[in-house]
Amino acid sequence: MSGIDNSEFIIIGGGAVGCGVAHALVKAGQTDILVVERADDVGEATTSQGAGLCGQPRDSLERTKLAMHSVATFRELQRSDVKPDWHEVGSLRLALSETRAAEFERLAQTASAAGLEAGLIGQAEAARRWPGLDFQRVKAVLWCPSDGWMTPRCVAKSYQAACQKAGVRFATATALEGIKLQDGRVTGVQTSRGAADCRYVINAAGAHAYHVAKLAGLELPIVPVRHEYYITVPMPNLAPELPCFRIPELTLYGRVRDGGLLLGGWERRSLSRDPRGYGLGAPSEPINPDWQVLGKFEDDFAELFPAAKPSEKSFVGKGWPTFTPDGRFIIGESGRVPGFVMAGGCNAHGISGSAGIGKLLVESLFERQPSPYVQSLSPDRFSENGWSWSDAQTQAARVYESYYGV
C-alpha cells in the first residue's frame, strides 16, 4: 500500500461533511486537498445510516439560506455523472396546536425573507398531496415545494467524484494516528500509511471528532447521541413522489422509501455517549434496535396514518450523530492551535447541511471579516471558556430531545 501525499488541506473524515467540505474548497479554487478516511470507502459510517431528508424552512435567516445552498448544490450534483439521488418531492410540516401553527407562520415569514418558496396551505390541499393522512387534528400545514430527500451514501460518492475530477485525493482504509505540531501550529498528520505535511487539518470525523481534536490538544464538547428510524416493507398507495413530512408535536419525520414507509423521530429521553469513554481507533458502539422507542414512533404516527400499524419492518437505521451544548455547529480555525480547523458537532444536519457547512468553513478561512454568524460557530467559544463534561453532555442531549422545540 502506498503512502499519502503532502497537501495544503488534509480533511479527516470521508463522510458527507468531509466530502462536502472538500467540494466547497474546490468551488473556492482550492484543489491541493487530501481526504483521509478510516473505512474502506467514503460515506460508510454515520452517513450511511442517515434518513436523507433535507428541509429548508428554519427559524433563522442564516440557517434557511444555508439549507437553500445545500439544495442548490444537490440539484447541481444531480446533473453530474455520479448523482446524489436527489428527489425534490417537497415537504409537509404539520402543526397539531395553535402554538405550533403560530411558529409555522414565523417560519413562512423567514422563508419569504430568504427568498424561499414556502407557505401555509389548507387541509384539502394537504390531503391531496398526502392521501391517507388524517388532517382533522391538524391546525396548520407548512408546504415547501423544493424540499426533498437524497440517499446519504450517494451524496458522499457524488461529492467524491466531483472532487476527484478537480484533483482531490482520497486515502481510504487509512487511520489517523497523530497530528504533528511545531511551535503550537499544525504542520501535518501521522497515519497508518505514513506521514504527510499540510497547512491545515480539517476535523470532519463525526463521532470521533472529539478524539481528533484531542490529538491537537483541544477539548471540545462533541457528544454522540443515538438516533433511530425504521423502514417498512412496501405498503399500498405509497407513491415515490409523495412529499416528506414532519410532525413536530409527535417529534416525527418520514418519507416514502422503496415503496415502504421510512419513519423516525427524536426521543424525549435520549441515549448519549461520553466520547472520553472510547478511543479514536474504536469502532462506534453497535446499536441494537430499541423496539420500545420505535414502537412509540409507530403508535404516534398511526393516530394520523392508521395504515402504519402494524407494519413489517425491513430495515432499522441507527447511528451516533453528534450534538453540542448550544445546538450550534463547531466550524472554523482554532485560535489556540493555528491550522487546526473544525467541521463538526453538526447536530444531525451533517448530511442535509453538508454543502452549507462547507460554505461556512470556506467563509471562516478566506473571508477577511466573516459574518457574525460564522464567528459564533468558532471552536474558540469552548476552548476559551470553562465548561464541564457533565453539563455539556446533559445540554447536548437536551438539544437532541428538543430538536422540534418551539
Image (cartoon, helix red, strand yellow):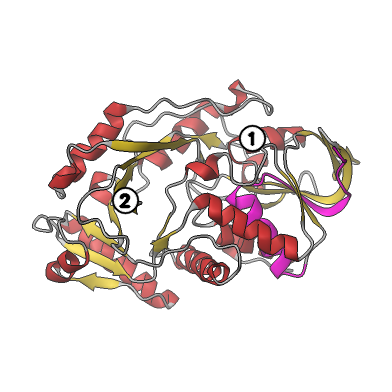
Measuring from the top left, give residue 341's x and y in whole percent. Answer: 72, 49
> Is 110 or 284 nearer to us in this picture?
284
Measuring from the top left, give residue 205's x and y in whole percent. Answer: 65, 41
For badge 2, the amino acid type reads: Gly
Quarter location, residue 162: bottom right
State the separation of the CA atoms marked 2 and 1.
30 Å
What's the residue at 59%, 53% (across, down)?
156
Judging from the image, what secondary structure is the residue with disc 2 in? strand
What's the residue at 14%, 58% (across, down)?
138
Q: Residue furthest left?
A: 136
Judging from the image, what secondary structure is the residue with disc 1 in? helix
Quarter of the figure that contains the N terminus: top right
Quarter location, residue 243: bottom left
Asked if residue 375 can be seen in this view, the reply is no
Going by the image, does 212 lie left or right of 125?
right
Vertical relation: 406 (above or below) 310: below
Going by the image, does 371 lie left or right of 187?
left
Q: Which residues are magenta?
A: 1-29
Q: Which mark is residue 254?
A: 2
Measuring from the top left, give residue 83's x and y in whole percent. Answer: 55, 63
Kindly identify which residue carries mark 1. 210
What's the residue at 35%, 51% (across, down)?
257
For badge 1, the amino acid type reads: Tyr
Going by the image, does 194 lie left or right of 265?
right
